[in-house]
């Protein structure tokens, strides 16, 4: 049987029914039963004052303002004005970039600990410039002839330059020198529309035209267009200029025609002018390349901004990656990404065999071992790691979109997370004026690369050569020149321990890190790539004070060392302070019959010092095979034994 209990509420009475066995009802008292039926009062969780405060809208607004203020202070403490924000602050997106090599621009402002770079590390150490500095001292004859050349109003040279920005740059340098050789005024070079990229930029869009004219005012007269007296004359066009012509050939071929017609039109000047020119013309080449050809202000401004953003956290490395589709086709090499990409390149090459630049009879593996192929991303990573590049190194990569897109760069981005290009660094809208203008984009890459602490190109090319010369002229800033011919066989050896591999790579590149190097040690070198000795000099260039410099030069030859600028003083020595020397055409053999055709210090003293029997340590030969590279670079030759003399230096 059951009984009913009634529960009362505060405001309204209602009845609740529960079923309980009669045995339990009988065992408990009435008061206990009522305590079970009536619900206890709930304790209040908040005091009335706190509840009223939280319900006050003014307090909520003040609290929200305080939180926003604290967040702003925290962000301001980490803010770097040189580093741009992300284009989309609420969502990290890669859509605005042509390709993202590593992190986006918003990821540049990373934590301080992650961004710190050991600036004193061996990798960032700059080479010894040996005190070389620019010196463009033209001869008296050159300065005398300049007066007549800049005043001439009868001869005009028109040139049409083609190719990419750096190729056009080289042709403009040659055009100025040719105008000087012919004694003609140079009409501002015409930039041919690039068929591949469709770039219609003009000279003044890329270079500072007024600066170009002012710098060369005493060398060659630069005019914007032909005068009215020559407008009705049809220019004679020359299309068959052979490669590497001399100034004498140019005068004999063109000067009479120019005097007759008053003008001459030249096309395709790439590599037409000889690299071995008289000293004054070599200095003029340097003057044009390093002083006159300055980028237009809007390009220089953006390039300097991007360089500052890269340097905001410390030193940085600039990589010029040659991994575009046309590069793989032209070089006869394979990208090594997948079989599909390799087959694509092979089919393209078979369809257009004329694109292959040279040595079509070589297979891909032969080209690879000969050092004729660009380095891929994995090879670049192994090379940089072997040379001591830290994982925290900040890298700017220049170049076009690689074949395979961002997947082709995965080895680089995974090993070096701080990996950026101009799309990553630029603020929204900064690159819009340069859209679809490959020459202007290349100019921005040139500036950021030239301003870097270390530079490396994966496959030479016009830009790599130009920056190498520019960095040498600026004080021999570090540049890594990959020794592909010697190192790739070690890349292909999987059994070689990593420690041994790194040591071998460092040894191979000990003399390829941007040290000063003389141009005249090898024929055909461009002075804009090797500006010493014509365009740079140091305190020992005019007068040799070290009597043993010549002996050191020959020791280097014997030991097989690369002929570097440590030997240049012996090349540049002239008769001075009692130091006697052999003239450039003289021969001077060592015990191994190595003859050096250069200016070599023999001894100090009077005219009789060049003689036999002067006491000095003898040079010991270390093997003819090891001497071959340095001997050939100095144009050594053998003579008959009866003409040989023993070298002795006090």
Image (cartoon, rainbow, N blue to C red):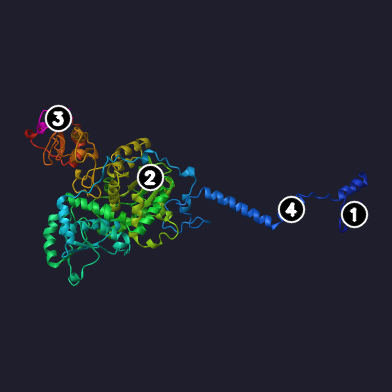
Residue 6 circle label = 1
- Look at discs 3 and 1 and give the one toward the viewer: 3
Callout count: 4
Image x and y of residue 352, in percent: 27, 60
User: In this orientation, which residue lies closer to the viewer: 332 or 437?
Assistant: 437
x%, y% of residue 117? 43, 42
Q: Is residue 153 left or right of residue 299?
A: left
| Distance CA(mark 3)–CA(mark 1) | 129 Å
Residue at mark 1 to residue at mark 4: CA–CA distance: 35 Å
Choose mark 2 or mark 4, whichever is in front: 4
Label 1: how many Cα within 10 Å (few below 14, some 14–19, many 20+): few
**Which callout, 1 or 4, points to the residue nearer the camera?**
4
The answer to whether residue 442 is above or below residue 630 is: below
Residue annotated with mark 4: 51
Contact flag, marks 1 and 4 (Cβ < 8 Å) = no
Cα distance, mark 2 to mark 4? Answer: 63 Å
Q: Secondary structure at mark 3?
A: loop
Q: Report the Cα–Cα distance between label 3 and label 4.
A: 103 Å
Q: Tell me the residue at 42%/51% (across/down).
A: 309
Relative to 616, residue 210 above or below: below
| Residues shaded magenta | 604-619
Query: Do the CB atoms of the residues marked 3 and 1 lie less than 8 Å apart?
Result: no
Residue 330 in view here? yes
Answer with the quarter of the image where residue 614 lies: top left
Q: What residue do we see at 72% from left, 56% from top?
A: 55
């Amino acid at each position: 049987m059951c009984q009913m209990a009634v529960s009362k509420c505060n405001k309204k009475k209602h009845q609740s029914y529960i079923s309980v066995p009669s045995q339990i009802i009988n065992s408990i008292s009435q008061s206990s039963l009522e305590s079970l039926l009536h619900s206890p009062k709930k304790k209040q969780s908040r005091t009335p004052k706190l509840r009223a405060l939280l319900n006050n809208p003014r307090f909520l607004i003040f609290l929200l303002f305080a939180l926003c203020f604290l967040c702003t202070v925290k962000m301001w403490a980490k803010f770097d004005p040189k580093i741009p924000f992300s284009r989309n602050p609420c969502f990290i997106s890669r859509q605005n970039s042509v390709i993202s090599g590593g992190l986006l621009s918003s990821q540049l402002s990373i934590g301080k600990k992650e961004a710190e770079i050991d600036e004193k590390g061996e990798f960032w150490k700059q080479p010894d410039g040996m005190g070389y500095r620019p010196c463009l001292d033209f001869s008296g004859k050159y300065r005398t002839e300049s007066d007549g050349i800049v005043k001439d109003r009868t001869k005009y040279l028109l040139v049409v330059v083609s190719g990419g920005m750096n190729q056009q740059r080289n042709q403009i340098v040659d055009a100025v020198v040719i105008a000087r050789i012919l004694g003609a005024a140079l009409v501002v070079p015409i930039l041919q529309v690039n068929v591949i990229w469709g770039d219609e930029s003009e000279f003044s869009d890329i270079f500072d035209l007024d600066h170009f004219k002012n710098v060369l005012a005493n060398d060659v007269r630069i005019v914007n267009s032909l005068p009215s007296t020559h407008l009705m004359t049809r220019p004679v066009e020359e299309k068959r200029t052979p490669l590497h012509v001399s100034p004498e050939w140019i005068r004999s071929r063109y000067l009479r025609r120019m005097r007759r017609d008053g003008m001459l039109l030249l096309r395709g000047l790439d590599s037409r002018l000889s690299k071995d020119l008289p000293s004054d013309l070599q200095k003029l080449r340097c003057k044009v390349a390093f002083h006159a050809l300055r980028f237009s202000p809007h390009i220089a401004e953006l390039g300097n901004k991007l360089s500052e953003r890269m340097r905001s956290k410390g030193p940085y490395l600039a990589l010029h990656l040659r991994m575009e589709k046309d590069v793989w086709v032209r070089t006869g090499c394979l990208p090594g990404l997948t079989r599909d990409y390799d087959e694509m390149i092979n089919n393209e090459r078979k369809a257009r065999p004329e694109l292959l630049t040279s040595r079509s009879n070589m297979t891909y593996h032969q080209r690879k071992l000969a050092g004729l192929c660009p380095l891929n991303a994995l090879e670049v990573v192994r090379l940089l790691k072997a040379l001591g590049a830290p994982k925290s190194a900040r890298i700017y990569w220049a170049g076009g979109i690689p074949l395979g897109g961002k997947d082709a760069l995965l080895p680089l981005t995974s090993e070096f997370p701080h990996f950026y290009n101009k799309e990553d660094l630029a603020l929204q809208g900064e690159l819009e004026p340069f859209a679809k203008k490959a020459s202007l984009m290349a100019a921005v890459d040139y500036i950021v690369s030239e301003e870097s602490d270390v530079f490396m190109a994966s496959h030479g090319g016009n830009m790599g050569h130009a920056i190498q010369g520019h960095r040498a002229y600026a004080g021999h800033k570090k540049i890594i020149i990959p020794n592909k011919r010697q190192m790739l066989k070690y890349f292909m050896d999987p059994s070689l321990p990593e420690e041994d591999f790194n040591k071998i790579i460092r040894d191979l590149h000990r003399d390829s890190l941007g040290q000063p190097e003389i141009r005249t040690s090898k024929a055909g070198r461009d002075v804009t790539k090797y500006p010493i000795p014509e365009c740079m000099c140091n305190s020992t260039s005019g007068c040799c004070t070290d009597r043993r410099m010549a002996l050191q030069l020959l020791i280097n030859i014997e030991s097989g060392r690369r002929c570097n600028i440590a030997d240049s003083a012996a090349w540049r020595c002239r008769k001075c302070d009692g130091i006697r020397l052999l003239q450039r055409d003289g021969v001077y053999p060592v015990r191994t019959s190595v003859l050096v055709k250069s200016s070599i210090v023999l001894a100090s003293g009077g005219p009789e010092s060049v003689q036999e029997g002067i006491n000095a340590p003898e040079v010991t030969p270390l093997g003819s095979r090891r001497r071959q590279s340095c001997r050939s670079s100095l144009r050594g030759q053998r003579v008959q034994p009866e003409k040989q003399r023993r070298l002795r230096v006090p």
